[in-house]
Image (cartoon, rainbow, N blue to C red):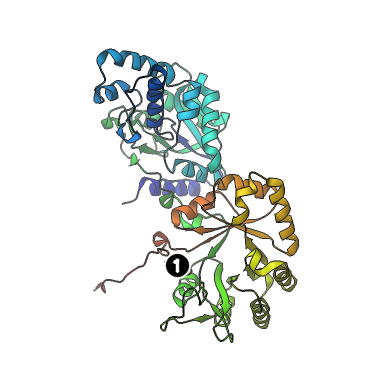
């Protein structure tokens, strides 16, 4: 059975096929759909304790909250708080739950929802609208807080795409949701989906959806209205899983993808069967120094094993070239390796536009990089810069100078790990300076897709993605990977 995110992807694809020129719009409710309101409840109740020197909520944790934000009294009853204190607490809660401070400090999105929004915002002629029951006087705070939360995901919300309740709080919300849909339709958008955590809101929208063009999605988080009000055809889900939403064929074409660790035959076969253009191989000299072999670990680290079948660089050049693929070589040694690699590539007449070299700054040094640049001026020449990451945000001028110097050596791509602190800010900074970035060490499909949403120039991954029928194994550094197994022959007759 398809998940709600998969159904959303299919419905979007279908709508796009039917209306190739239209401005397509997906609508999101905010509270309980984008925002996990339990954080707000927790924050406001803890602030009661702080301001009254009480200890009612000292041990209260996020997971303990199972009530809707309009039903705080139920939570107080569950916590067995004395009746006479309840009134004071509820008064505090009502006064502070929508204070600017609470909105800006305590609002948190559900895991994955910002990625889903980002994905749609990246699609051509596609828009994400907000359709909320919040009153219009909260417009400025709403945009400010959502944009602050969206920042690290490159998500932006705009005034024109926010429809709010023209009435007071909690008044007429279901009708407001239908009015929101009509408003956006009148403004020229074709609404194809609407997500809300309240069944009665979806029910109201279904009244203005006679042909079922709008896919209704119920965010099954915490809701107040009766489930039986759910219109037929509503799709329900809890987890915003981008691995269900984003299909391989819809990946952006301007990002270069690299299959990491093509050092053995199994990985090579997997790679050649994929639609990925770049294979990354680790090059070093064989123990007798007669050949260039593909192996991640040095022999002193991991001694040669009797059963190890070494793949030679010269043996993969022909299949790669014949199948129109390109080669990224991670040069693991200094000394004669660089010269030997260049000779071999030249002998096979490989074009610079199909080549990419990676090496450590300290390992290859200025001389090594200049040599690569001279031999292949049109190749990508890359070095990892993880060791200068800590200073990039604290001493940007110094970092920029370092990168300029490396650029002068011939390096035209900088590589950083997926698990870099403040990755979004780091990427923006390097982007702003006009350098290209590769992201590597991306552990799984979910992280890979999140990296895609940040739109670096390239991403290097193991392609250990069972969902896409890829079982890349990386460079054999001993990290985890999925394996597929054949259990039995199935009979078709
Ligand atoms: Mg809601």
Q: Is residue 446 visible?
A: yes
Question: Which is nearer the eye, 185 or 199?
Answer: 199
Indicate the quadrant containing the C terminus: top left, top right, bottom left or bottom right: bottom left
Residue at left offset 55%, top offset 64%: 258
Residue situated in front as seen by the camera: 349 or 438? 438
In the image, is 115 to the left or to the right of 338?
left
Report the side of 54 relative to 275 (left or right): left
Within-10-Å neighbours for mark 1: few <14, some 14–19, many 20+:
many
The residue under the point 58% across, 84% down is 291
The reply, left or right, for residue 146 in relation to residue 413 is: left
In depth, the one of 371 and 336 nearer the eye is 336
Q: Circle 1 sits in a helix, a strand or a loop, which is it?
A: loop
- Is 72 situated above or below 417? above
Instruction: Tell me which image quadrant ligand 1 sits in.
Output: top left
Nearer-the-camera pick, 396 or 142: 396
Residue 190 image position (x, y, % from top left): 50, 37
Compared to residue 247, the image places residue 182 above or below, namely above
* Residue at the disc numbered 1: 472
Question: In the picture, residue 86 is in which quadrant?
Answer: top left
Residue 476: percent from the left, percent from the top? 45, 70
Quarter assignment of residue 95: top left
Q: How many marks?
A: 1
């Amino acid at each position: 059975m398809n998940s709600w995110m998969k159904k959303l992807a299919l419905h979007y694809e279908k709508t796009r096929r039917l209306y190739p020129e239209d401005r397509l719009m997906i609508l999101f409710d905010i509270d309980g759909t984008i925002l996990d309101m339990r954080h707000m409840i927790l924050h406001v109740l803890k602030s009661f304790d702080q301001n009254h020197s009480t200890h009612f909520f000292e041990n209260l944790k996020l997971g303990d909250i199972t009530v809707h934000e309009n039903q705080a009294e139920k939570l107080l009853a569950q916590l067995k708080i004395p009746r006479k204190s309840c009134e004071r607490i509820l008064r505090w809660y009502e006064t502070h739950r929508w204070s600017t401070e609470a909105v800006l400090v305590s609002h948190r999105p559900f895991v994955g929802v910002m990625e889903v929004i980002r994905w749609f915002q990246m699609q051509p002629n596609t828009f994400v609208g907000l359709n909320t029951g919040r009153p219009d006087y909260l417009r400025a705070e709403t945009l400010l807080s959502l944009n602050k939360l969206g920042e690290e995901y490159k998500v932006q919300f705009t005034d024109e795409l926010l429809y709010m309740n023209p009435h007071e709080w909690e008044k007429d919300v279901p009708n407001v949701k239908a009015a929101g849909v009509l408003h956006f339709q009148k403004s020229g958008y074709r609404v194809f989906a609407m997500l809300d955590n309240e069944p009665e809101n979806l029910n109201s929208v279904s009244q203005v959806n006679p042909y079922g063009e709008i896919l209704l999605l119920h965010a099954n988080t915490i809701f107040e209205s009766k489930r039986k009000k759910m219109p037929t055809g509503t799709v329900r889900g809890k987890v915003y899983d981008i691995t269900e939403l984003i299909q391989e064929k819809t990946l952006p074409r301007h990002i270069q993808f690299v299959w990491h660790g093509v050092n053995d035959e199994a990985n090579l076969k997997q790679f050649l069967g994929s639609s990925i253009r770049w294979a990354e191989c680790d090059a070093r000299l064989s123990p007798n120094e007669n050949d260039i072999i593909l192996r991640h670990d040095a022999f002193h680290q991991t001694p040669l094993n009797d059963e190890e079948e070494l793949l030679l660089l010269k043996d993969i050049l022909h299949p790669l070239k014949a199948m129109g693929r390109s080669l990224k070589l991670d040069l693991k040694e200094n000394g004669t390796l660089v010269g030997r690699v260049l000779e071999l590539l030249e002998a096979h007449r490989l074009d610079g536009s199909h080549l990419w070299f990676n090496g450590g700054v300290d390992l290859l040094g200025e001389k090594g990089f200049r040599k690569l640049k001279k031999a292949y001026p049109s190749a990508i020449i890359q070095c990892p810069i993880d060791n200068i990451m800590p200073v990039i945000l604290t001493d940007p001028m110094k970092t920029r100078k370092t990168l300029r110097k490396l650029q002068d050596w011939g390096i035209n791509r900088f590589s950083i790990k997926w698990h870099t602190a403040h990755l979004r800010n780091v990427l923006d900074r390097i982007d702003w300076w006009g350098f290209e970035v590769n992201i590597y060490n991306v552990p799984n499909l979910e992280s890979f897709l999140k990296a895609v949403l940040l739109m670096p120039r390239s991403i290097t991954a193991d392609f250990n993605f069972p969902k896409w029928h890829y079982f890349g194994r990386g460079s054999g550094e001993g990290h985890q990977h999925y394996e597929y197994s054949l259990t039995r022959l199935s009979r078709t007759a």
